[in-house]
């Protein structure tokens, strides 16, 4: 191991191990007890006695340790500028949205899968997918590695994914054209569509099947998510009103 | 006072509302702790932008996990630990918690009052800002937040003696920086960053 590797380990791993040790020490001393004892000791020690009062407040002090602590504590507090809350509130709102899906997704997934099974495969044309205004996703980029090559590794899976992707797109387009969506579902659908767009950008840059295969898997998974979202309105209405109430409560 | 200002008791009703995800309660908690959290981060990092980022990340982590807070320990202690961890992680990202060697300043206090007892806040803040980040963080965590050397050693991934030496050398360097007769000494700028 080179000196540089050693330095890297010192710099990255040791502090992490230290934090783990720290967490263990705190856990071993009982839940919250370390913090409680810390609070106790802080409360006991934070009231400055005569020896802790800084000189500049008019009291002599000859204990350097205590007087430094007191001087440091006497420094003024500061507040973040500009205000951090608006950004925090925005991020919190965005991050809390998926919690609703913990309840809605299983129900919607079941309904979506059931619907998908009801759609006969023969009804799905193998030609290029229709484009409807209701679906923001696009067909895969034209320079995506072709899945049809019989000899390239992963070709069969790639061809299957390609076909599945087209089927899902078509199904979503046909379904979305008639399905009413509430604002929550629309927002979620937009997010997934953005992600699909991102995968398509990566697919356009894929050099070979090895690059493309994981991206196609991802694309199909995202399309399945989108199909789930699109069918959500029916699923929630058909199953449990309380799910919708719980979801909206979480979003409030 | 920074150490004391962290010790804010959050009413149970506010915590309960925050656990339910009420944005108003989350803001109440944020407003109560924004100054102590930011002050701690600023003292440790010495950079307003880095302190803002640290408080943002720490608050986000706290507010997202507030539902898991069991209430058997002071809320402020939990938050403070998150802020300290975030600040240390920031230092690690920036400098790998690099340790800048401080010279062994002559620290023979004698009978005179220590210079920080006579210095005003601006001078002390300026001197503090001249310490290496890790030294300043250790000094602050020990003196103001009252963590033990063992706790600081565990948090920073260093030894107990490292924590002790940082406190001693940091205090000594502060003394040198605040002594009027030593202000022009060349070593004063050696560790500035």
Image: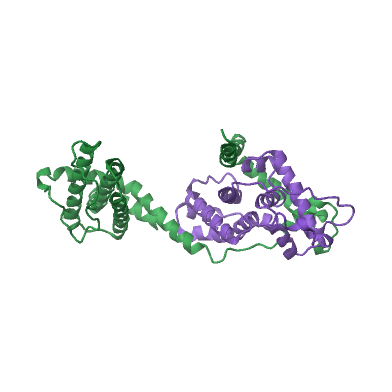
Chain colours: A green, B purple
The front one of B66 and B2 is B2
Q: Horizontally, is B63 left or right of A171 in the view?
A: right
- Between residue A159 and residue A210, name the one nearer to us: A210
Q: Nearer the viewer, residue A204 or A102?
A: A204
Q: Give the position of the C terminus of chain A as an image quadrant.
A: bottom left
Farthest residue toward the left?
Answer: A122
Q: In this view of the protein, can residue A26 be seen by the observer?
A: no
Q: Residue furthest bottom?
A: A82
Q: What is the count of numbered marks?
A: 0
Q: Position of residue A131 (x, y in %)?
A: 17, 58
Q: Is residue B41 visible?
A: yes
Residue placed most toward the observer, A217 or A227: A217
Give the quadrant of the N terminus of chain A.
top right
Q: Image point 76% across, 65% down: which residue?
A: B120
* Identity of the residue drawn at 17% across and 50% down: A171
Q: Position of residue A19 (x, y in %)?
A: 58, 40
Q: Give left or right: position of A85 versus A244.
A: right
Q: In the rendering, at what x and y percent does residue A159 appear?
A: 20, 41
Measuring from the top left, give residue A185's x and y in whole percent.
29, 56
């Amino acid at each position: 191991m080179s000196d540089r590797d050693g330095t890297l380990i010192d710099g990255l791993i040791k502090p992490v191990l230290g934090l783990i040790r720290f967490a263990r020490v705190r856990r071993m001393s009982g839940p919250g007890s370390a913090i409680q004892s810390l609070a106790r000791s802080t409360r006991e020690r934070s009231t400055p006695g005569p020896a802790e009062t800084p000189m500049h407040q008019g009291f002599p002090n000859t204990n350097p340790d205590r007087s430094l602590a007191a001087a440091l504590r006497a420094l003024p507090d500061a507040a973040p500028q500009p205000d951090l809350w608006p950004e925090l509130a925005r991020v919190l709102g965005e991050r809390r949205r998926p919690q609703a899906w913990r309840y809605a997704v299983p129900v919607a997934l079941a309904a979506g899968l059931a619907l998908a099974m009801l759609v006969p495969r023969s009804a799905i044309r193998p030609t290029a997918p229709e484009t409807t205004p209701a679906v923001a996703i696009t067909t895969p980029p034209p320079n995506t590695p072709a899945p049809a090559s019989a000899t390239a590794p992963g070709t069969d899976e790639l061809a299957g994914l390609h076909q599945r992707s087209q089927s899902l797109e078509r199904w979503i387009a046909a379904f979305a054209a008639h399905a009413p969506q509430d604002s929550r579902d629309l927002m979620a659908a937009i997010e997934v569509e953005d992600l699909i767009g991102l995968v398509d950008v990566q697919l356009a840059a894929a050099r070979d099947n090895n690059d493309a295969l994981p991206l196609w898997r991802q694309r199909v998974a995202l399309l399945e998510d989108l199909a789930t979202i699109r069918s959500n309105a029916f699923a929630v209405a058909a199953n449990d009103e309380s799910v919708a109430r719980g979801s909206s409560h979480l979003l409030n | 006072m920074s150490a004391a200002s962290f010790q804010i008791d959050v009413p149970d009703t506010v915590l309960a509302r925050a656990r339910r995800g009420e944005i108003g309660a989350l803001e109440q908690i944020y407003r109560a702790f924004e100054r102590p959290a930011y002050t701690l981060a600023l003292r440790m990092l010495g950079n307003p932008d880095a302190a803002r980022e640290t408080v943002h990340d720490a608050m986000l982590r706290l507010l997202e996990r507030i539902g898991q807070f069991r209430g058997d320990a002071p809320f402020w202690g939990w938050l403070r630990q998150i802020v300290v961890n975030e600040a240390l992680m920031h230092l690690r990202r920036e400098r790998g918690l690099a340790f800048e060697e401080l010279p062994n300043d002559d620290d023979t206090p004698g009978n005179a009052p220590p210079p920080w007892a006579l210095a005003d806040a601006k001078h002390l803040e300026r001197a503090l800002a001249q310490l290496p980040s890790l030294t300043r963080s250790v000094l602050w965590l020990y003196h103001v937040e009252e963590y033990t050397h063992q706790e600081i050693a565990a948090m920073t991934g260093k030894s107990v003696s490292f924590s002790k030496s940082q406190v001693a050398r940091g205090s000594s360097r502060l003394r040198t920086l605040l002594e009027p007769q030593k202000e022009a000494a060349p070593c004063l700028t050696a560790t500035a960053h």
